[in-house]
Amino acid sequence: MNAGLRIIPILGMAEVRPGDHLADLVAGAAAGQGTPLLDRDCVVVTQKIVSKAEGRLVALDPDDLDARRVLIEQESRRILRRRGDLIISETTHGFVCANAGIDLSNVDDGMAALLPLDGDRSARDIRNALRAHLGVDVAIVVSDTFGRAWRRGLTDVAIGVAGLAGVVDLRGSTDSRSRELHATEVAVADEVAAAAELAMGKAAGIPAAIVRGLDPAWFREASITELIRPPAEDLFR
Amino acid sequence: MNAGLRIIPILGMAEVRPGDHLADLVAGAAAGQGTPLLDRDCVVVTQKIVSKAEGRLVALDPDDLDARRVLIEQESRRILRRRGDLIISETTHGFVCANAGIDLSNVDDGMAALLPLDGDRSARDIRNALRAHLGVDVAIVVSDTFGRAWRRGLTDVAIGVAGLAGVVDLRGSTDSRSRELHATEVAVADEVAAAAELAMGKAAGIPAAIVRGLDPAWFREASITELIRPPAEDLFR
């Protein structure tokens, strides 16, 4: 029924620069380490390299808290909470996260990386390029590291998907005792991002991983909006 | 640096009954399918089978909404939100989740499974029994399926840990460009639970999985309290 999963970090990728083609970099590095991409793989790429490749970089003095605040507000459509320097906001995409997802780590000094404008388009571009260049049919998840309400610690989640369901709806399926299941919409793209993070390692600078062995039924056209809870249905905003 | 991870579902486990020894059931099934447990594996077991083995079952007519409400309130120390039949509460353990984690699926008709009284103790008992009976040193994560604020879909998270860090603190580590990282406390036990869920499959009734290849530095004495955000530091409660 289920032979299990492999999570394969993609090592040896060169530093990503604006204009780079991530599909080629990822596919080259995967082949170079002896794990070429296969049909029905899901490749997880971090927001950081997607933002760099897409040139989503702006100058920001990390000590200029006013400039930082203005930038966060520009990238947000609604500020939810402030505590000290920390701002929790709803980004222009609808993600709720700290500091509008703006990132200073692993970026050149004096620069900040903004979230991709459209994570689904970023994912789709990579997926289409891999199909065109290599003839492989792989799904793509763009991941980022977000905090959560209620629980300590950060986890990686999806901020863009292509070819893989965001949420798999198991409502109406029956459990192993044939009673109807309730409320089992599983956020598989977020779980895929989290699984990949375990292999990539935060401080090791590994920006991509292959998740191999996912349920074939989960591969379909998809959108990150499946994972975004509209404010009106959210009890905690 | 990182050879990747394998997530191996443990198939063929018999239905768990009160008083069963999960360590023996898990180890037997793992060996029976040709993937015996190894040192430095992390075994993820679902709340459902832990609650069953520990006899955390109560009679509950699923159509008696009043009785259901009373039970949820008994298992909670604070009700956070109500909407229709849905109650979001802080359980006696400090978890924030729907319906105090009480579960009707995959349980005998007319019965409900409560959360384990102490998920860390549940995990530690399994870990100690595996060491005593098999001589293997494996970490244990007890997982459950929770909703989130802000994002649609459920993910599996940890509700008990033994031998594996809940949160890995990378603050003070440096990123690949030697700048100090901020706020990178990674919730590895939650990511391990999420990764395992991808292999277990919600409707397939697979109640355990092996996560193999985790960073050896993450194996240490631990507590689920690492993952519980105290109400006073939570901006969304």
Image (cartoon, coloured by chain):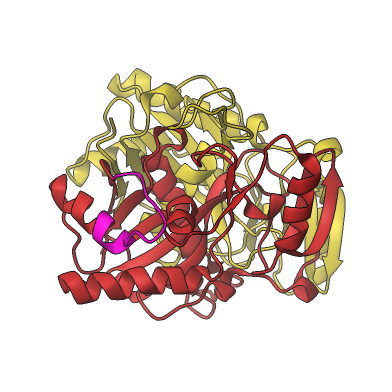
Chain colours: A red, B yellow
Towards the viewer: B185 or A4: B185
Foreground: B53 or B125?
B125
User: Is residue A166 visible in the rendered structure shown here?
Assistant: no
Q: Quadrant of the N terminus of chain A?
A: bottom left
Q: Is residue A38 left or right of residue A235?
A: left
In front: B60, or B174? B174
User: Is residue B113 one of those drawn in magenta?
Assistant: no
Image quadrant assignment for residue A164: bottom left
What x and y, as percent, mark residue B129? 41, 24
Which quadrant holds the C terminus of chain A? Answer: bottom right
Magenta stretch: includes residue A19: yes
Residue in view at x 39 percent, y 55 percent: A45
Lateral position of residue A22 relative to residue A197, left or right:
left
In the displayed structure, A36 sits above or below A206; it is below
- Side of A189 where B63 appears, left or right: right
Instruction: Tell me the residue at 27%/55% (across/down).
Output: A26
On the image, the x and y values in percent for residue A32 come to: 14, 47
Q: Look at 53% across and 63% down and name the residue there.
A: A116
Is most of the magenta stretch helix, strand or loop? loop
**Would residue B61 be visible to someone looking at this image?**
yes
Instruction: Judge whether A96 appears above or below B3 on screen.
Output: below
Q: Which residues are magenta?
A: A14-25
Estimate the x, y position of residue B20 in percent, counting from the top left: 45, 39
Q: Looking at the image, is B215 positioned above or below residue B97?
A: above
**Percent coordinates x, y for residue B46 in the rendering:** 49, 48
Tally the numbered discs. 0
